[in-house]
Image (cartoon, rainbow, N blue to C red):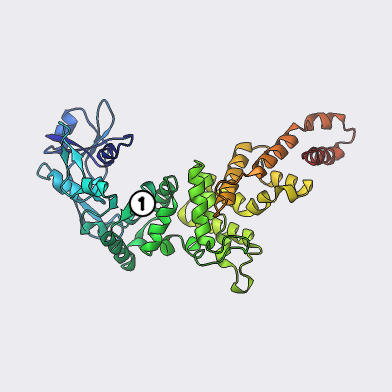
Amino acid sequence: MRIYCVGGAVRDELLGRPVEDRDWVVVGATPEEMLARGFKPVGKDFPVFLHPETHEEYALARTERKHGRGYHGFTFHASPEVTLEEDLARRDLTINAMAKDEAGRLIDPYGGRRDLEQKRLRHVSPAFAEDPVRILRLARFAARYPDFTVAEETLALARQMVACGEVDALVPERVWQELSRGLMEEKPSRMFATLRACGALVKLLPELERLFGVPQRADFHPEVDSGLHVMLVIDMAARLKLSLPARFAALTHDLGKGTTPAELLPRHHGHEARSVELVEALCARLKVPAECRDLARLVARFHGDVHKAAELRPATRLAILEYCDALRRPARFAEMLSACEADWRGRLGHEEAAYPQARLWQATLAAVQAVDAAAIARACADPAQIPQRIRAARLAAISSIV
């Protein structure tokens, strides 16, 4: 029995990055031997075990064979005769197909270290084409390592996969899993640029693809269309280290602009309502978690109003706070403001701009929260007048904010 550390831990160690999780491959062992050593079985499709003390995953070396469409169409074979090189050959990218033995020696049969040094994302073998999830992973790694390039032969293979319909077999849950992880990487725009380059974006997120080539408003930079603006916005969201719900909201806030009639361009009158409809449809299709969906709807609907905070009447500001349930959910409202800040600063020349609107909205919310509704209710002789008195006090408090 020989044990090797494999995959991301080896890659990150060579890159000088922190290693969070370690995966292990066991060569020359049987499931019975693993059980005899105290390992706990957890794998369903192939033998994977948890170490009795560290609880890290140890998988028996295996090969895989494609027998159908999509990423479920595989038969796995694990036995003591499977070599480490055979196990590594089934992995997606060369930088993920390296191993270290128990003495710390690097095993790199597919040139992963060279590709790390040359900052290149390259597939291990033609078997890359057998699993459409690998397109999403390729795009995610492009977002994680902004200074890496995708090898042309790998991009060509991804294009062939899209043309053959492999991407159509992806299930919504797996698409969302990879997209959400990509949004949390260093430069999320590179994920979508990679998906566009191989033709997968129009299949997976047609609402987003439609934004490219659509002019922005006349006051935006003339070289930035609606799609490029959104890319700048999600990169700003990453720079601001926003949460996943806020980054998803940043991604989807302008979807309605892709449906603006040509005769109205570059104006986008009413795109907020269309954006909300598209957000709801996209979230239903990909089974997006409610936390992300709900924040995305609010940002899509109100980002324009949030930007114009100083111009809004107190009644309008109060109505927005009430619609957003900001008094009961101030943390979510703060996330909404952060996504709006990413939108505001996601424009060429605006990257370092201040966003005083957020402070104004926070002051508005604080003023409304400071109104003692219970005291107003106790002092009101006519119960029917209580809501009106509370509203009047809140509007007066908002009006006092400079």
**Residue occupying image coordinates x 50% and y 61%:** 227
Vertical arrangement, residue 207 with respect to residue 387, above or below: below
Q: Left or right: 329 with respect to 394?
A: left
Q: How many marks?
A: 1
The percent coordinates of residue 182 (x first, y second) are: 41, 49
Front-lying residue, 343 or 147 = 147
The answer to whether residue 172 is visible is no
- The crowding category of the residue bearing disc 1, from other C-alpha atoms within 10 Å (few below 14, some 14 to 19, many at least 20), is many
The N terminus sits in image quarter: top left
The quadrant holding residue 328 is top right
| Rendered position, 280 above or below 23 | below
Q: Position of residue 151 (x, y in %)?
A: 28, 57
Q: Residue at x 40, y 54 (%)?
A: 191
Q: Percent from the top left, x then y, of residue 286? A: 46, 54
Q: What residue occupies the far top of the structure in this picture? A: 53
Which residue occupies the extreme left position in the image? 81
Tell me what residue is drawn at x 61 percent, y 67 percent.
266
Identify the image quadrant of the C terminus. Answer: top right
Comparing 307 with 259, the one in front is 307
Q: Disc 1 marks which residue?
A: 142
Whether residue 230 is visible to the viewer of this picture, yes or no, is yes
Please identify the quarter of the rendering in which residue 264 is found: bottom right
Q: Quadrant of residue 70?
A: bottom left
Is residue 32 rendered to the left or right of residue 250? left
Q: Amino acid at mark 1?
A: Ala
Q: Residue at x 31, y 67 (%)?
A: 164
User: Whole-percent x and y of residue 195?
Assistant: 39, 59
192, 331: nearer the viewer = 192
Of residues 357 and 248, the one drawn nearer to the viewer in this rendering: 357
Q: Secondary structure at mark 1?
A: helix
